[in-house]
Amino acid sequence: HAGQGTYYDTGLGACGITNVDTDFIVAVSKDLFDENLTDGNPNHNPLCGKKIRAFYQGKSVDVAITDRCVGCKYNDLDFSPAAFETIADIALGRIDITWEWL
């Protein structure tokens, strides 16, 4: 998959999990998240907790899905600050990434 990578201030996510900025988590696009809903309760989404490996300029980071990103396009990922900083300078804000399911 290829898309844009950004970062956000964490907190209570769509999966019902409260995270902090140092957790290695990610929010996937609302479209990807919503198409996997099974019973209307986002906490039961099978994507919650699923792992992704994201790549940027030869670096990679493994993250768990805990949230839904309203402003993201289908293959975009919105990282916690700590996860973003593992692969890029936070000052960049937005990067071109590739990613795969683990």
Image: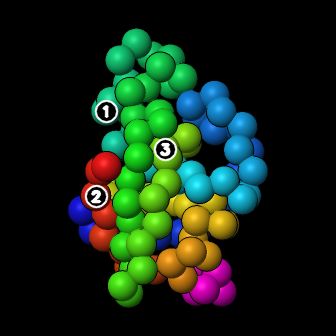
Residue farthest along the left direction in this orientation? 1
10 Å crowding of disc 3: few (<14), some (14-19), many (20+): many
Question: Is the magenta region chiefly helix, strand or loop?
Answer: helix
Which quarter of the rendering shows the N terminus?
bottom left
Which mark identifies residue 65? 3
Q: Considering only order in the chain, which callout, 1 or 2, is on the residue closer to the N terminus? A: 1
Q: Position of residue 37 (x, y in %)?
A: 38, 24
Residue at 61% in and 76% down: 85
Residue at 31% in and 32% down: 35
Left or right: 2 as drawn, with respect to 59: left
- In this view, the residue in front, 34 or 11, is 11
Quote the CA–CA distance across marks 2 and 1: 18 Å
Q: Is residue 91 magenta?
A: yes
List the residue tagged with mark 1. 35
Which mark identifies residue 60? none
Q: Position of residue 81 (x, y in %)?
A: 66, 66
Q: Considering only order in the chain, which callout, 3 or 2, is on the residue closer to the N terminus? A: 3
Q: Considering only order in the chain, which callout, 1 or 3, is on the residue closer to the N terminus? A: 1
Q: Position of residue 78 (x, y in %)?
A: 52, 60
Residue 51, placed above or below residue 72: above
Which amino acid type is shown beneath numbered disc 1?
Answer: Glu
- In this view, the residue in front, 58 or 9, is 58
Q: Which residues are magenta?
A: 89-93
Which amino acid type is shown beneath numbered disc 3?
Answer: Ile
Dot 3 falls on a residue whose secondary structure is strand
Q: Is residue 60 magenta?
A: no
Which amino acid type is shown beneath numbered disc 2?
Answer: Glu
Image-quadrant location for residue 13:
top right
